[in-house]
Image (spheres, rainbow, N blue to C red):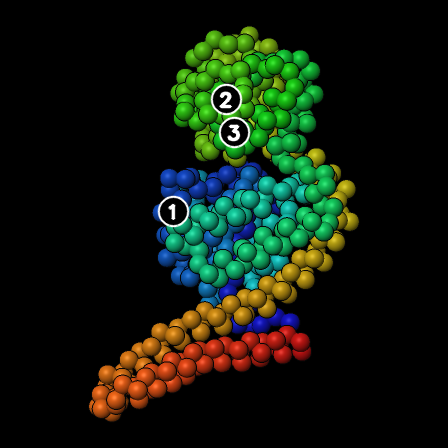
Amino acid sequence: MHFCFVLNSISIIAFTHRHFSFDEIGLLHLDDKDRQRILTKINNELGFDELMYLSTCNRVEFIFSGSTPFTSTQLESLVKMLLEQHANSNVNGMIEKAEVYHGEDAVTHLFSVASSIDSLVVGEREIITQVRKAFEECKSFGLSGDVIRVLIQSTIQTAKKIYTESAIATRPVSVVSLAYFELKKYLSSPKNILVVGAGKTISSMLKFISKSHEHQFSIYNRSIENAQKLAVQLDLSAQVHSLTSLGENKEEIDVIITCTGSQNAVITPSIYNRLNPSHRKITIVDLAVPNDCDESIKNLQEVRMITVDELKTIAEENLKARSKEVNACKKIISQQVDAYFQHEKQRKLERAMSEVPERIKVIREKAYSEVFAKEIDNLDPSARKIVDDLIDYMEKKYISVPMKMAKEILLKETIK
């Protein structure tokens, strides 16, 4: 049983791998330095109470909380704000392909995302951490409040329940591990590996690679300090360079692994020619969204290219193999959605009742200082103490009794 006054409080706008290319999704990613400003602008202009922004390699989603559902006009405004830095982008096309969820559908969708059954790779546990961090960041921006907090708390509980009670993650395969399984075919002996970037995706990829053979690494990153930390943490035999010097050092390369947050190609044709002047056979793993490598490099005869887009075929095969588990997970999610709405209704009551103590305090102070001021001043100390004790008792009961009665009403409605 669901409750109408809650259903419309959550809206989700999703741009996912089902309808968008990874390059298109990449246009919607917000850089760290601009994220708070842009999200604050979005929330203010669209007029919602709360906002959360979730960004992964295969989706960008906005969770809104407000008194009314998301409208088509607001969707158009959202897309235009996201694409204002990309003059040639197809705004109407992006609007048409966006997924819009309200109320129960929105909650079900978010539970499915965190439980990985909506992921490009089913059973990918990484998404639950991404959801938690996305909430914490938006909370720190002052954009996510108690409504989204309760939603995310239930979302994470649901994901944990899925991972515990189903076999959906018994063979977890992330995008990174899929990429590694492909790259592994060409790592039968020690290789010279050039790495571009030093973020989490690169770190995860290098953990796999460093387990076999004594590969030699050259790491290029905007922050040399972060690149050095990565090399130390993984105990790699590595040379560290600034990203600005990419292509300037003479080194024989067998493999390039790249993943940065750049919106433009990091490895251009001219840089690639300097990296591989002899045009020897080379394997490139490009995990960036949008891709770090210029599109023309993919077509070079000597290049074996592994990209997130190409991993989609393997992911779809995994999805078919796990279809039975997906159905079992959907049953768990349905039960959890019911539990969420009951919990949210109770929490909404608690939010409303949280104002009661302060209002009672104001009434009490007025009674003492104005309404019964003369009468109280004329009381002897013992009588004054009795009055104080009586008011204290009534004050506590006035707060607790209505809350208890309201919870009993909620319980009866749930049983019905």
Task: Give the position of the C terminus as an image quadrant.
Answer: bottom right
For disc 2, the neighbor class at 10 Å (few under 14, some 14 to 19, many from 20) is many
Q: Residue furthest front?
A: 382
Q: Secondary structure at mark 2?
A: helix
Count the labels in the image: 3
Residue 215 vertical position relative to residue 401 in the rendered view, above or below:
above
Looking at the picture, which amino acid does disc 2 mark? Ala
Image x and y of residue 56, in percent: 54, 41
Check the image and report above or below for 157 versus 322.
below
Residues under labels 2 and 3: Cα distance? Answer: 16 Å
The residue where tag 3 is placed is: 259
Which residue is identified by label 2?
Answer: 231
Q: Of marks 2 and 3, which one's residue comes earlier in the chain?
A: 2
Q: Residues within 10 Å of mark 3 (few under 14, many from 20)?
A: many
Q: Earlier in the sequence, mark 3 or mark 1?
A: 1
Cα separation between marks 2 and 1: 31 Å
**Which-is-in-front pick, marks 2 and 3?**
2
Can you see residue 215? yes
* Picture layout, residue 154 above or below residue 186: below
Q: CA distance from mark 3 to mark 1?
A: 23 Å
**Nearer to the camera, 163 or 69:** 163
Tag 1 residue: 36
Residue type at tag 3: Cys
